[in-house]
Amino acid sequence: MPKMFVEVLLDQNLARPLDYEVPANMRIEVGMRVEVPLKSTLKKGTVSKIKDSSQWETVKPVARVISENGELSDAQWKLARWMAQYYSAPLQRVLKCFIPVNVRKEVKEKTQIFLKVAKTHDQCIKAIELFRLKAPAKAHALEEILNAPKGAYLADLQVSKSAVTSLIKDQWISAQSVKLSSELLLEEEFFPTAPKKLNAEQQSCLNAIQNSLEKGGFSAHLIYGVTGSGKTEVYMQAIAAALAQNKSAIMLVPEISLTSQTIERFKARFSERIAILHHRRSLGERTTAWEDLKKGQAKLVIGARSALFCPAQNLGLIIVDEEHDSSYKQSDEIPCYHGRDTAVMRAHIESCTILLASATPSVESRYNASVGKYQLHQLLSRATAASMPKVKIIDMSGVFERNQGFTHFSEELLDGIKKRLGKGEQILLFLNKRGYHRMQVCSSCRHVIKCPHCDLALTFHKSGGFLQCHLCDYRQQLVRGCPNCQSTETLSFRGFGTEHVERSLHAIFPEVRTLRMDRDTTAKKNSHEEMFKQFRAHKADVLIGTQMIAKGFHFPSVTLVGVLNTDATLNIPDFRSPEQVFQLITQVAGRAGRAELNGEVIIQSFLPDHPTLKLAASQDYSAFYDAEIEERKRFGYPPFCHLVKLLFTDPDEKTAQTNAESAYQRLKNTLPKPFEILPVMPAGHAKVKDLYRFQFVIKVMKIGAISSHLAEIQGAKIDVDPISVYF
Ligand code: ADP
Ligand code: ZN
Ligand code: ZN
């Protein structure tokens, strides 16, 4: 019998696949998980190719097949290979997206400890209060278990094991060793909601999607629908249509809007089992969801970016909600893929329908619609009685003069807040910076106190009493004297963050109840969601927060939104800055007046005449797009070309720069024309975590034309279609 060989990609990060021989009695397929000998140990990997010869003299045999079924479908393989090539990433790094760590580890312990409270709710509440002082760990553990009405896996809780043991011993909770399954976690019954009768705009959009689903084959749709126009209702009916054809559907949403509010809307509509995938879910939950999908037991997937790689069977529909959202792009890790674009590719490969939607479609997607690649659907009015909010720009330099100094709040905003407080309505205040003061500066020599590890000013956090770096989380005490000019009384604070805004608001309205939402207050698991629930339940009048508060939430009693300052973002020298500011303001503004009450939005700025702000204020997406696409064309930015950013980092500044320069020279001399290559520059943050950063950008018409050249560049982080050319 002729010999057979395979190429195996090891899980550990080796640059190239290794050859192994297939023992005579072993059945093997591309995609299978295998164990192979390397040096003196066995390593796990994935078969990436089968062939009948090997260039090597001696090739060791595959030791064993870990899983019989090919781990990936043909379509998944195709997508992985496309990603590896398009994003210039090693295939094994790409495969990590498709075979998540839990599946790789072959979760051995098939049983888990399942915990439930064993006493009444009231008894537990009392006990928690008692424990709080003497045994806080126990109080915390009991509280966490009490918060999961159907019980919880021990492995999913962030609680002390000894506290749990003691709670079991004293019979506060019961423990059961169970086989891992999703059944136990099936949440409360929902009153099923019937599909709503669609308005004309929604209906014509749904018809087009249904048409595509029936015809089969690849087709792409883009919904431009203002906030509250009923996009979600269209998604649900489109999904129902796909499920009715016995096909499965994947809906991607930005991580931050994947909350129980979103999930409940879908659970209440669909009786099918829904697989929910995102990184906050535990290993157990994710493994179960993955297996349900492979077996075809779950047909509807809702998840963040990475859910796009899931093994959904017989895929009919992919939806990318808020398709403009930059969190779809993986920028900090290889492969630097864009979830939206990769989703379009998956739809292509699987010959299915894809639906992108946003209130502020990305310039690229809107352009694709205008050249006929996507079918465009517009939902221009709100689906309910709610009207669009009124938006006003306030010139803060005038406010500065009248106040003879800085204040967070213009007279209009203060009046607005006062009025809402009087009526028992709610307010959102948006500010793109957390902390108390942005930085400490010497007024005599202008020295800024920076992070010793990064090229960034340290932010003062008053609640913690320390300075903190927002890039690497380094902390230190406040600086007393200027380290540069040694003067002792010249250090002062500049700029403000959410903490300061909250304090100032309390100084003006002593009775006001506030909630602050930023990375500082939402570090704990689920706290993000808890705060939203509290705010919805009207436990606070004002919600102050960073971009976290801008997304997807529906607060019926919010009637005023204040945008305190986005000038800094407007000033970032990046071709996407205007787009980002426009999107952000539109999204935040969209939180106002989502119900019967009319909404008002106040944008405060020192650049009140900035065209982007004006367009955002008039909420005229079409005008914004028309202006922006002109700019992109004039200056040669996407969608009129593709960008590739190559980033070189090194602990030594000179080395980082030299590496960047030599790659630059090499590409400049070898890339096929036409292309443009921009000079090597320090990145927007020139140093992060003790690594110096240099980068350059290439402009080309087709990525495919330069892929092989990029693949030869060593030591760079290659970012194809980067979100930012600056950072
Ligand atoms: P979007 O996703 O575009 O922001 P939603 O789908 O959340 O909008 O819809 C906003 C509100 O309008 C929701 O309360 C939703 O239930 C309601 N809604 C959507 N479509 C309809 C419809 N056809 N008739 C009545 N109400 C609708
Ligand atoms: Zn100084
Ligand atoms: Zn730092």
Image (tube, grey):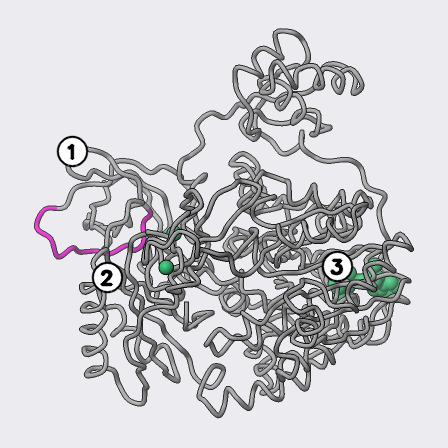
Which residue is at a point 32% across and 86% down the rendered structure image? 675
Marks 1 and 2: CB-CB under 8 Å? no
Front in this rendered view, residue 7 or 405: 405
Which residue is at a point 58% across and 16% down the rendered structure image? 164
Name which of mark 3 and mark 1 comes first in the sequence. 1
Q: Secondary structure at mark 1?
A: loop
Tell how many labels: 3
Asked if residue 56 lies in the magenta stretch, the reply is yes
Query: What are the residue bounds of the magenta stretch?
Result: 46-58
Question: Gap in Å between the C-alphas at discs 1 and 2?
Answer: 29 Å
Q: Quadrant of residue 235?
A: bottom right
Question: Dot 2 corresponds to which residue?
Answer: 715
- Outermost left residue: 57
Q: Position of residue 671 (x, y in %)?
A: 25, 82
Name which of mark 1 and mark 2 comes first in the sequence. 1
Q: Secondary structure at mark 2?
A: loop
Question: Dot 3 corresponds to which residue?
Answer: 236
